[in-house]
Image (tube, rainbow, N blue to C red):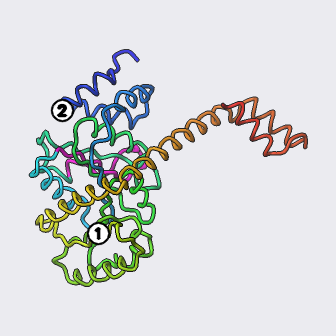
């Protein structure tokens, strides 16, 4: 397309710290335009260094406040930070309903922080389909830590594990989160559990319940044992301990090979998803066309069974 930005040049500018170039690259992967493959190819040599941290939990536990406080702590430690806040999609425009600068305005103007809201666009897992590529953009742009804050929609939040090197599960007292965590399988995905709003009544009980439930998990002597931390993110209390714990988990995951295992699985799933999307696209092109009509007629006439027809359709779409 005439006048379209050159992906290689945009990546070069993003690596030089130009936030506008980072924003344009993320927009390109979100829009899935004709140059998406070029963007992906240009990013590939410059990725794999950032520590990706997923933050998940039910609505109302203080995810955005915790994310903002963690950004402040990481910046104080000299880290460059990227934030992908994955929001519910507008039913009209498909865009994110919650604005990043509304929630994290205190970081506006800090060149060491890049914050982007992304719409789920109806994706049930709580994460935008474009999130893996957006992570690569921030990684290539030199972010040391990338925080992925998810929508918070219940059991489907487990998808965050597929993208994160470390997963933080946020809970709050008085919301029945301990029980809900067990029901939703959240206990299985967390590397660090944080009881936020720890100045409220019932916080100690929530911490105790979580620790008791986590104690029942099978774990070998060299396995990571998820800690339960207490924070009051609105006052930045306990956030330094959370940052320390995330560093400890990163060190353990690198030594144990868990980080490499997760990243391999992440890429494997991404390749499968791209392949399935390409198959779906090709099938859509055939839908309603002469090939599918002919196969449908042969099945109705009893000259072909549906399985054989599907095999032939796949062959023709390849």
Which is more N-terminal, label 2 or label 1?
2
Q: Which mark is residue 97?
A: none
What residue is shown at x 27% (from left), y 60% (from top)?
249
Q: Which of the 4 quarters of the picture holds residue 225?
A: bottom left
- On screen, residue 126 above or below 17: below
**Residue position for label 1:** 193
Q: Secondary structure at mark 2?
A: loop
Work out whether residue 308 or residue 282 is closer to the camera in this orientation and state it. Answer: 308
What residue is shown at x 39% (from left), y 57% (from top)?
161
Q: Which of the 4 quarters of the picture holds residue 229?
A: bottom left
What residue is shown at x 86% (from left), y 43% (from top)?
300
Task: Report the residue that reaches farthest toward the left.
Answer: 76
Assess disc 2: are there few (<14), some (14-19) or many (≥20) residues with their C-alpha within 10 Å of its C-alpha.
some
Work out whether residue 10 or residue 285 is closer to the camera in this orientation and state it. Answer: 10
Picture coordinates of residue 285 (x, y %)? 64, 31
Q: Which residues are magenta?
A: 80-102
Picture coordinates of residue 309 (x, y %)? 79, 40
Picture coordinates of residue 134 (x, y %)? 34, 40
Assess disc 1: are there few (<14), some (14-19) or many (≥20) residues with their C-alpha within 10 Å of its C-alpha.
many
Q: Is residue 90 magenta?
A: yes
């Amino acid at each position: 397309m005439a006048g379209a930005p050159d992906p290689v040049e945009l990546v070069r500018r993003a690596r030089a710290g130009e936030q506008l170039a980072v924003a344009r690259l993320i927009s390109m992967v979100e829009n899935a335009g004709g140059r998406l493959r070029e963007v992906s190819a240009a990013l590939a040599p410059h990725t794999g260094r950032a520590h990706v941290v997923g933050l998940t939990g039910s609505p109302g536990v203080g995810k955005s406040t915790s994310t903002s406080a963690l950004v402040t702590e990481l910046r104080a430690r000299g880290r460059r930070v990227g934030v992908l806040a994955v929001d519910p999609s507008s039913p009209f425009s498909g865009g994110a309903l919650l604005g990043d600068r509304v929630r994290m305005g205190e970081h506006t103007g800090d060149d060491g922080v890049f914050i982007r809201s992304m719409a789920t666009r109806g994706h049930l897992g709580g994460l935008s389909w474009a999130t893996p590529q957006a992570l690569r953009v921030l990684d290539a742009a030199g972010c040391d830590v990338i925080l992925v804050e998810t929508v918070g929609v219940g059991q489907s939040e487990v998808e965050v594990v597929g993208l994160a090197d470390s997963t933080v599960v946020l809970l709050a007292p008085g919301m029945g989160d301990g029980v809900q965590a067990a029901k939703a399988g959240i206990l299985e995905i967390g590397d660090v559990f944080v009881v936020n709003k720890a100045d409220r009544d019932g916080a100690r009980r929530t911490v105790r319940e979580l620790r008791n439930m986590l104690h029942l998990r099978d774990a070998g002597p060299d396995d990571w044992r998820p800690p339960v931390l207490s924070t009051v993110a609105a006052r930045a209390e306990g956030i330094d301990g959370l940052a320390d714990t995330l560093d400890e988990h990163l060190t353990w995951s690198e030594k144990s090979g868990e980080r490499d295992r997760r990243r391999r699985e992440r890429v494997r799933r991404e390749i499968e998803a791209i392949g399935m999307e390409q198959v779906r696209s090709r099938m859509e092109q055939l839908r309603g066309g002469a090939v599918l009509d002919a196969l449908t007629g042969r099945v109705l006439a009893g000259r072909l069974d549906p399985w054989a027809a599907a095999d032939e359709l796949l062959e023709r779409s390849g």
